[in-house]
Structure formats: structure tokens, C-alpha cells
Image (cartoon, helix red, strand yellow):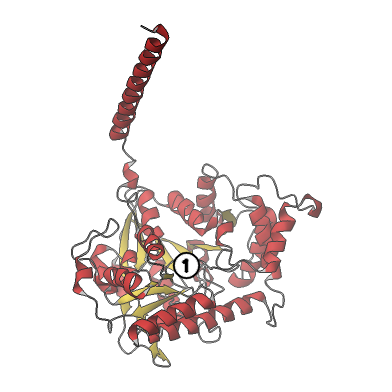
Amino acid sequence: MNLTKAAAGLRSTLSKSSIMKGDRAISNTAAAFQLSTRLNGLDKPTVWHEFSPLAVEHNAVNLGQGFPDWDPPAFAIEAMRKSVDPASNRNANQYARSYAHMPLAKVLADDYTERFGRTIDPATEIATAVGCTNALYCALQGIASPGDEVLVLEPAFDIYVAQARMAGATPKFVPLRSAENAATEGDDPKANDFFVLDFDELEAAITEKTKAFILNTPHNPTGKMFNREELTKISEIIERHPHVTVIADEVYEHIVFDIENSPHVSFASMPGMYERTLTLSSSGKTFSATGWKVGWAVGPPHLVHAVTAVQQWVNFSAPTPNQDAIAQCLLMAKEPYEGFDSYYFWVAEEYKRKRGLLCDALKTGGMQPIVPDGGFFIMTDTSNIDLPEKYLEEKTVAMPADPMPRDWALSRWMTKEVGVTAIPPSAFYDKESIHLAKNLLRFAYCKGDDTILEAKKRFKDYFCN
């Protein structure tokens, strides 16, 4: 017998045996592992996991997710180049202070001093974060405790609910309800008047456990902008409940279309509300730079400290070059741009134009847009569309309900049969309120003209032939 071959065979057998034992050990370890209970239900596939791949699979025009499909303006790209270039002497390649990169904090303090009509201290009343999502995470971790409640208006950006639960709090929901005889723009209802908040219902939802109320204006996904009269009523409610902190998400603050009749009003600017409000915003939407992830929180020192006390133990600081570039952008955005008095006026007008393109496309498909005065999205009435019954019988990992909600099934049908993808708004409701989304879909117009026009073509080809 060849001893060399025998030894090699034995080594091979032992090696395979060791691998099999190792695989079993890994398998046993994986079976024994459990995620933190804070993540119960939050580790499952979401609407985003379902519809983006579905759009790719069916070569659909994706009007679902809200990010621009173009690059930031040239002055923003140049600002980033300067931030990382040692020759520019901006000293932005090392850690920033945990609260905020001071050049950005000073620019933000000047902006909000003007907006709020009070002096904002850049050292103690400004915190920056890795996007508004990170700012909100830190805020909720710093404000809410297990057993507390966080009040949310429905439909709500799904991150609000997830982050409240991760903080150990219980989300409570107050839905915006559809109004009859809403004011119109042309033949179409306006989001500001179509989506109505019942203030008695809001106050009734507040309990002794309510720690925070998340107020989003301009509102995602409806495009509603709360006017001064509505914010006054909300502030009166908050005044009667001094244990509640308002977290005001205002990331779409510069993407507003009727400044004279429907201006953006910051809740913190309402009488008596600055000390009760943490205002959140970011640069990603305004400068078409969602990947730069620079967000911020503005408020009284005790509320800003709730953010920074968490951030110092999480990511410590947002990337310094990104913060530094946005500090430059915020200054340059006030200068004349492309024939407009400022970049802010230009970007608002550009989105207003794209809103018009998408409204026209949706009407080609037999749907009625509910016209927003701000933001990236249009909620659309789809009640005129006949949905094949078989789509209501489907189940997916992200939506296992039986029957499937009509809006979810309709979005799947539209992706597969029409070739256009929207987001079903039931993803933004608690299960008790999903019926309110039955005849709605959310479409994004933060897309190139060619993309929107291709969607219109597909609607026309399907519905008009």
C-alpha cells in the first residue's frame, strides 16, 4: 500500500469531518442566536425591500423612493472639493467636535436666528448628525424611555415608528383624515385642505405617558403644509401638556411652491414653543445630495443635549468634509442662481415644474392627484382603477395580510402590468388605519423629466389604447 496516498486520504477524511463539525457548530450557534427584543418586528422586509427589486424585475419606471436621480449643483460639488483639499486651508479632514463642525454650526445659527427671531447660540443650540434620520434616532434615544409614548400623525414616514420602538417607547397614532369639498387647484384637490387633522382627536391621544410628538411639515407622504392657524391650535394643545416635547421634522422646508399663500412655518417660531421644540432638518433634499448625509437639530440647550449625549457614544460626529461643504452651500444658496434671486427659489420652482409634469402623467392614467404645496411626493386617488381580484389574493413577505390591502396590491399590479412603480401608503399607517390608504398611491416627482415622461407614456399606452 502506498503510505503517502493513505496518509493523504486520512487527512482528507479528517478535514471533511472537521468541516462538517464546524458547519454544525455554526448552525447550532445561529439557531441559538436571538436579536435584541428592541428589534421585534423591525428586522423583517419592508415596503422598500419589496418594490425596488420588483421594479427592476419588471423594468418598471420607479417613481417610488424619494431621492433625486441627478447630481448636486456645481457649486456644491466645488464646495466638497474645497473641503477635502488641504490647499484650501479649510482644515476639514479630521474629526469635527461632537456637537457640530463649528463653521456649519455658525451658518445654521445665523439662519435660524433670522427665522425664529431670537439669537441662536452655535455652541449649545445646534447639533449636527449623519442625516436627519440619525438626528431623529439620537433625539428619541435621548428623550424617550421604555414605557413612554410617542405621538405620530398618519400617514407617517415609517422610520418614525421604528425609531420610537427602538427607544423602548410605544408609538400612538392620530390619522390625517380626508376632507370633503377640499379646495382645488384646477380640478384637483389640494393636499393642504384634503388631509385634515382633528385637533380634539390629537389632544385626546395625549396621556401622562406621552413624551414626544413628531410633527412633519411639509409632510411626507401627503405634501400637506400645516398653516399658521393649524400650528397655533397645535401649540395651544402643547401648552396644556407641558410634559410633551415636539420634534419638528422640516427636511422639505425649502421645497415649497406657494410662498405667498402657503409658506413654510417652523413650529418653533410659534409663541412659547421654542423651549418645547427640537427642530430637525438636513441638506440632502435641498441640495440633491442625499448621500452626503448631513442633518441637524436646532433647539434650546436641554433638548440639543438630548441629541449630543447619544451621538457622542454612537458615531461621535458627522463626517467633517461633508459638514464643511454644506456650510459653504448654505451661504452660496442665498446668492443669485440660474436667473433666480437665489438657489432656494430656483430649486423650489424646478420641483414645482416637475410636480406639474407628474400631475399631468397621473391624470393620463385616470388617477386624480392630490396636489401638494411642498415636498417630493404626490398622493393620488386611484378609485377609478379596476384592480383584478387575483392581486388581492397575493401574499408577500413584506405584506402577509389576507387579503392584501388594495393599495399594496394595486402597486404590485401597476408595476407588473403597466410598468410604473409607486409606493403603497398603507406602509405609512398602523394596521388599525390601513383602510384609509385603500384608494391612494404615493408617487415621487424628484425624478428626471425623461423618467416622468416615460411614466406618462406607459400610462397612455395602457389606459388609453
Most extreme residue toward the front is 1
Q: Position of residue 310 (x, y in %)?
A: 50, 46
Q: Is residue 374 shown to the viewer in this render?
A: no
Q: Quadrant of residue 33?
A: top left
Q: Position of residue 30 (x, y in %)?
A: 32, 34
In which quadrant will I find the C terminus?
A: bottom left
Q: Secondary structure at mark 1?
A: loop
Q: Position of residue 126 (x, y in %)?
A: 60, 57
- The amino acid sitting under disc 1 is Gly
Q: Quadrant of residue 405?
A: bottom left
Q: Is residue 14 left or right of residue 404?
A: right
- Mark 1: give few (<14), some (14-19) or many (20+) Cα within 10 Å: some
Q: Is 225 above or below relative to 47? A: below
Most extreme residue toward the bottom is 186
Q: Is residue 341 left or right of residue 35?
A: right
Q: Is 94 above or below relative to 345? A: above
The residue at 52%/62% (across/down) is: 280
**Closest to the observer: 330 or 423?**
423
In which quadrant will I find the N terminus?
A: top left
Per the image, the residue denoted by label 1 is: 66
Q: Is residue 464 left or right of residue 262?
A: left
Q: Is residue 79 shown to the viewer in this render?
A: yes
